[in-house]
Amino acid sequence: NAGVTQTPKFRILKIGQSMTLQCAQDMNHNYMYWYRQDPGMGLKLIYYSVGAGITDKGEVPNGYNVSRSTTEDFPLRLELAAPSQTSVYFCASREQGGETQYFGPGTRLLVL
Amino acid sequence: RKEVEQDPGPFNVPEGATVAFNCTYSNSASQSFFWYRQDCRKEPKLLMSVYSSGNEDGRFTAQLNRASQYISLLIRDSKLSDSATYLCVVNRRVGTYKYIFGTGTRLKVLA
C-alpha cells in the first residue's frame, strides 16, 4: 500500500492564480481530511469528508473548495491564491470506526 | 485560550536523559487522546494513543489525567533519533470526530 499520497510536493503560485492539490489513499478509508500547518501553529482543519459525495467545512474553509467523487481521491482547490494561503497542506485519512489518522507527506505552497 | 496547549520548547536534553512533556486540554467532552511525532518538514505520525490507565511502548509512556485535563508523555533513555516535534492531539465528537492539534513541543537530544 502506498498509503496517503499528495501531489505536488512544492508549488509557487502568483496572487490570483488557482491550483488543485491532489490527495489519494489506497486504504479504502471513508474519512479524509485537509489540514494546513503554519509555522508555530497547530494543524487547522480546512475541509473533511465522511465518504464519497459528502464533504463539510472545517475550521478554516474560506478560499478553498473540495470534492469527493471517489473513495480514493480528495482534491483541494484554491481558486484565487492569496499570500495568506502560504502554508504546508496535509491530507489525512482514517477508516470508519478507527481513530488513527494517516497523513500524506504534505504540499508546501508559497503564494507570492 | 487554546483548546489544546503545549509548551513549545525546545527541550534540549543529553542522550540518555529522561524527558517529560505535558499537554492540557480545555474541553471536558474530549474523548480520545494521542501523541503524534513530526520530524522537520515531514508529516505527523502516530506515536501512541493515550488511555486513562496509561500505556507504555518501549521507552515511551503516556498518561491521561481526566480530572485535571492533561496528558503527558515520558521518554526514557533519550536517543538522538528522538529529536522531533511532539504533537498532542485531542479528539471529540461533534457530529463526526473532530481532532484538535496542539502546536507541538520541540525536543532536541544532544550528543
Image (tube, rainbow, N blue to C red):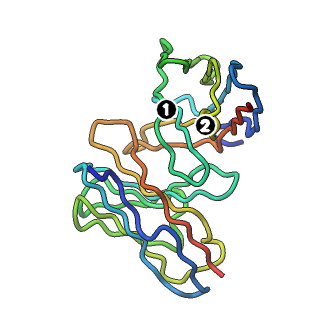
Dot 1: chain letter = B
Which three-letter amino acid code belongs to the residue tagged 1?
Answer: Leu
Quarter where residue B98 is shown? top left
A56 relative position to A110: left or right: left
Image quarter (top left, top right, bottom left or bottom right) of the N terminus of chain B: top right
The location of residue B51, given as percent across then percent down, is 47, 19
The residue drawn where x is 63% and y is 38% is B4
Residue A65 placement: quadrant? bottom left
Q: Are marks 2 and 1 in contact (CB under 8 Å)?
A: yes
User: Secondary structure beneath disc 2?
Assistant: strand
Quick one: which residue is furthest to the front in this view? B111
- The percent coordinates of residue B23 (x first, y second) are 65, 30
- N-terminal of the pair, mark 2 or mark 1, is 1
Q: Residues within 10 Å of mark 1 (few under 14, many from 20)?
A: some
Q: Position of residue A94 (x, y in %)?
A: 33, 45
A108 to the left or right of B108: left
* Mark drawn on residue B47: 1
B38 above or below B90?
Answer: below
- Cα separation between marks 2 and 1: 9 Å
User: In this rendering, would A54 be left or right of B78?
Assistant: left
- Seen in the picture, residue A93 relative to B81 is either above or below; the reply is below
Number of the label disc, if any, that sits on residue B86 = 2
In which quadrant of the rendered image does the C terminus of chain B lie?
top right
Q: Amino acid at mark 2?
A: Tyr
Name the one closer to the observer, A50 or B54. Answer: B54
> Picture quarter containing residue A32?
bottom left
